[in-house]
Structures are given as structure tokens and as C-alpha cells.
Image: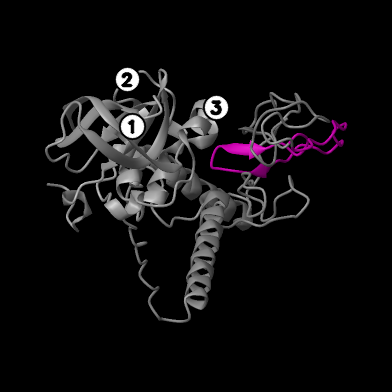
Amino acid sequence: MQCECCHEIGQPGTRCRKCSYQLPPKTPPPDNASATTLDSTDRVKCDYCHAFVQIGVTCPSCSHPLLPSTPTDGDRKRAAWARAAAERDAAWEGRGRPAGAKADNKCTSCGRAISPDKTHCNACSGGGRRGPAASSRRTGIIAFAALMLGSTVVAVIALTRGGDAPAPAAVPAPISPRPAPPPPPESPATRVANAPTFEQAIALARPALTDSTDELGPGAQLLASYKKLRWADVDVAAETTLGRVEKDPALERGKRLCATGEIQRIARRDLDGRKVYVGQLRTADGDEVAFVAVGTTGDLVKRNTATLCGAVLGMSGPAVSILGMFKLDENQLPLVEQ
């Protein structure tokens, strides 16, 4: 049996393998079933299974005998329309369907082919009619949806930017200069040298003052870096005694005193390009005093008697170590360094 939708041959009472159209069941032919419907000049449609076969032969689908009949005017018109449609489809298959051409044998709902002698699609529940191909219709719907979407996006952008006003230009963030590295910390010698007074210089150098057998120990070198020492800084009332220093050097370091005695040894040393004098004297009571003298020493030499005033550094062996100045007229001038 031939399908009325796509013309595929199938078994009566089953669904078409191509378009799933339900084929009618097989029924016995009527007694007077001798006439057929004309389809073309030499083919007729079987009234039982609707297959198009040659006139005057037996139907290959249902074995129903077909007899020639007299065609009517309506049959001739349908046959002519079928021939024209077949010729047009054959021409399109050879060179491709022209742009905008309509597939009049396609359903507008499901896109399946409709029999040439039918005006409605029997395969879909919508009962669609012949019209443009479904693919062309889908293309139009997609184009319309894209147009509407583009219009919506343009309208939203315009509202966001406040109409036609241009978007403000992005201002680049200013580049902040790299912060300057912190200055290096001052060394203890620099802090002692820059101390405003001799008392503050002693306080800064006190942690470095220790007992040492060196004539220029670390504590002595640190306190000697104070280059603004004046006679008035050391010519003060005694803050300690030699006996107290010998008893507890750590407690008496940095305190000021004066000692008078005979110079047993005196020698020049250069400290950071500055002249200092180191040596030792003995008091009348027999106490030993090791000294680091800044300023001038005048004509003082070994075995001369002199008075030294300064700050206690600690102990240098059995002798009390002092950094200060000799009591000379030159050292009492405003400019001590000679």
C-alpha cells in the first residue's frame, strides 16, 4: 500500500516507515470495484490501497484488478497539476531550489510532504496546509528573534549610559613613587660624636665601657669619638674616688674625677686622624692611673707632675683607666684642640 503523505510503499494497517503516517487497514473490495481514479495519462490510483499503477493491470500492493475507466474533467486537472509539480521538483533537484521558492508540497506545521491531490496534512495533528518549507519558516523566526534581541541590547546600553552621552574615559591610576629606603641606622660612634653634651656622650658610650688591658680599648675609642670635649666638661666636683673605682669598677664607670701624680709613660697615638696620648701616672699615695688624654699635652713628658681630669673607663690591669684632659692653660682656651 502506498502512503498518502510521502508515497512510500508500506503494509496496510501499519505506520509508514518514512513519515510514520498510519496506513488504513486492508478491506475486501466491493463487488463493483472495477473503476479507478485517474492520476496521469497512463496511471490510475487503486480504490482499495490507493497505489498508482498502470491502467488495466493488477495492483502490485493489494492484487486488486484495475480496469480502465473514463476520466473526468477534474481527473484531468489533477493529473496536469501532478505532472507540472513533478517536472518542477525534478528541475529543482538538478540545479538546487531557487532563493525564496516555496515548497508547495510541504506541511507548514511538521514539514512533511503532502500528497499532490491533498490540501491538508494527515500526518500531523495540527492539520497543516501547504506553504513555505519549514526550514525557511524557521530561518525567518530566528532572524526576527535576533533582530529583536539586538534592539533590546542597544536600548539597555543607551539607558545605562544616559542616552547618547558618551561613556567617560577611563582615567589611569596615578603611579605613586617608590618610597625612599629608610636611612641606615647610625653607628654608636656617630651617636656619641653627635651628642650635644659630654654627659650624654658618656651615657651613650657606657654600655661599651669595660675593663681592658689595651691602652685603647673599645670603650675608650668610642668615648674618644666625642670631639667637642672642653676643660669645663671635666673640671667638676669629684663624683667618685680611685678607691671606689678599684672596689667596684662597673658601678663607677662614667663618673668624673681628677688625679695628680708623676707621669711614668706618655706616647702619642692616632685615632681616626686625631691625636690622642696614652700613658700612666702614679699618685703620691702610690695609686696607678692609666690615661687617654685628648686636647694638648704641652711640654709634659715622663717624670713630670701633672693633673688629669676625666671620666672613668674602668680598670686596666691594676690601674684605674680615665679618659680626659691635662690641666694646662692651653686646654682651658675655647679651642682646646691645638
- Amino acid bearing label 2: Asp
Q: Secondary structure at mark 3?
A: helix
Looking at the picture, how far across and down is residue 149, in whole percent? 53, 64
Up/down of 175 relative to 250, above or below: below
- Amino acid bearing label 1: Ala
The quarter of the rendered structure image containing the N terminus is: top right
Q: Which residue is mark 1?
A: 220
* Magenta span: chief secondary structure: loop
At x 45%, y 37%, the residue is: 206
Q: Residues within 10 Å of mark 3 (few under 14, many from 20)?
A: few
The stretch of residues the image draws in magenta is: 21-49
Looking at the picture, how far across and down is residue 171, in whole percent? 35, 67
Disc with the residue nearer the chain's start (1 vs 2): 2
- Please report contact status of discs 1 and 2: CB closer than 8 Å, yes or no: yes
Disc with the residue nearer the chain's start (2 vs 3): 2
At x 36%, y 54%, the residue is: 197
- Amino acid bearing label 3: Lys
Q: CA distance from mark 2 to mark 3?
A: 20 Å
Looking at the picture, how far across and down is residue 323, in whole percent? 33, 36
At x 42%, y 39%, the residue is: 93
Q: Which residue is mark 2?
A: 214
Which-is-in-front pick, marks 2 and 3?
3
From the viewer's perspective, tell me whether residue 49 is left or right of residue 234: right
Q: Is residue 36 magenta?
A: yes
Front-lying residue, 287 or 172: 287
Q: CA distance from mark 1 to mark 2?
A: 9 Å
| Residue 187 at least partly seen | no
From the viewer's perspective, tell me whether residue 308 is left or right of residue 254: left
Q: Quadrant of residue 138?
A: bottom right
Looking at the picture, how far across and down is residue 289, in whole percent? 35, 28
Q: Which mark is residue 247?
A: 3
Front-lying residue, 30 or 104: 104
